[in-house]
């Protein structure tokens, strides 16, 4: 699982929301294929507000989550390029560079010892 909180450029929030709607609406089939290509089984995003401004909180999970950012940076599939260009615009980060965002590192990892994850 990969979780990221990525700042959004304030002026781009409405465009970002419209783009998310496009991914889940008119381009859903392409978005489904994109996630399959990337090896993802879960791809979620939340819009959060912080004192510094809006954030996209993104969680991806699946066999391809560990190298998702590298695959996204290097893909030349038309939908992937479209996806990458839009997130670069909305976040002000060049996602075509493999080192644009380093994956976060777990610093706290607690769970109830008797917990059994039935979703796995």
Image: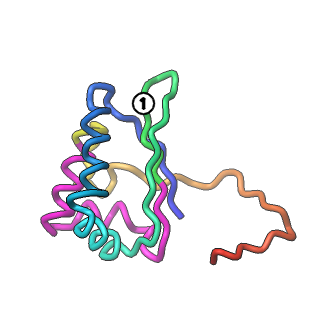
Q: Nearer the viewer, residue 13 or 100?
A: 13
* Residue 110 to residue 64: above or below: above
Q: Residue at x 66, y 51 (%)?
A: 107
Q: Magenta stretch?
A: 59-88
Q: Does the segment drawn in magenta span residue 109? A: no
Disc 1 target residue: 54
Q: Quadrant of residue 36?
A: bottom left
Quarter that holds the C terminus: bottom right
Which residue is at the far right? 114
Q: Residue at x 30, y 75 (%)?
A: 37
Q: Does the segment drawn in magenta span residue 64? A: yes
At numbered mark 1, what does the secondary structure look like: helix, strand or loop?
A: strand
Q: Residue at x 27, y 64 (%)?
A: 28
Q: Position of residue 21 (x, y in %)?
A: 29, 49
The color scheme shown is rainbow
Q: How many marks?
A: 1
Q: Position of residue 35 (x, y in %)?
A: 34, 69
Q: Nearer the viewer, residue 106 or 5?
A: 5
Magenta stretch, overall SS: helix
Q: Nearer the viewer, residue 37 or 71?
A: 37
Task: Say whether residue 11 is left or right of residue 52.
Answer: left
* Residue 100 to residue 72: above or below: above
Task: Say whether residue 74 is left or right of residue 55.
Answer: left
Q: Residue at x 81, y 69 (%)?
A: 115
Quarter that holds the N terminus: bottom right
Q: Residues within 10 Å of mark 1 (few under 14, many from 20)?
A: some
Which residue is at the far top? 51
């Amino acid at each position: 699982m990969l979780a990221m909180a990525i700042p959004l450029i304030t002026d781009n929030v409405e465009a970002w929301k419209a783009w998310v709607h496009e991914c889940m609406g008119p381009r859903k089939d392409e978005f489904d294929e994109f996630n399959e290509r990337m090896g993802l089984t879960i791809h979620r995003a939340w819009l959060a507000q912080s004192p510094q401004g809006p954030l996209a909180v993104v969680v991806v999970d699946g066999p391809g989550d560990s190298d998702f950012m590298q695959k996204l940076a290097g893909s030349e599939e038309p939908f992937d390029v479209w996806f990458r260009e839009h997130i670069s615009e909305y976040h002000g980060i060049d996602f075509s560079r493999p080192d644009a965002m380093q994956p976060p590192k777990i610093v706290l990892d607690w769970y109830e010892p008797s917990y059994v994850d039935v979703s796995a």
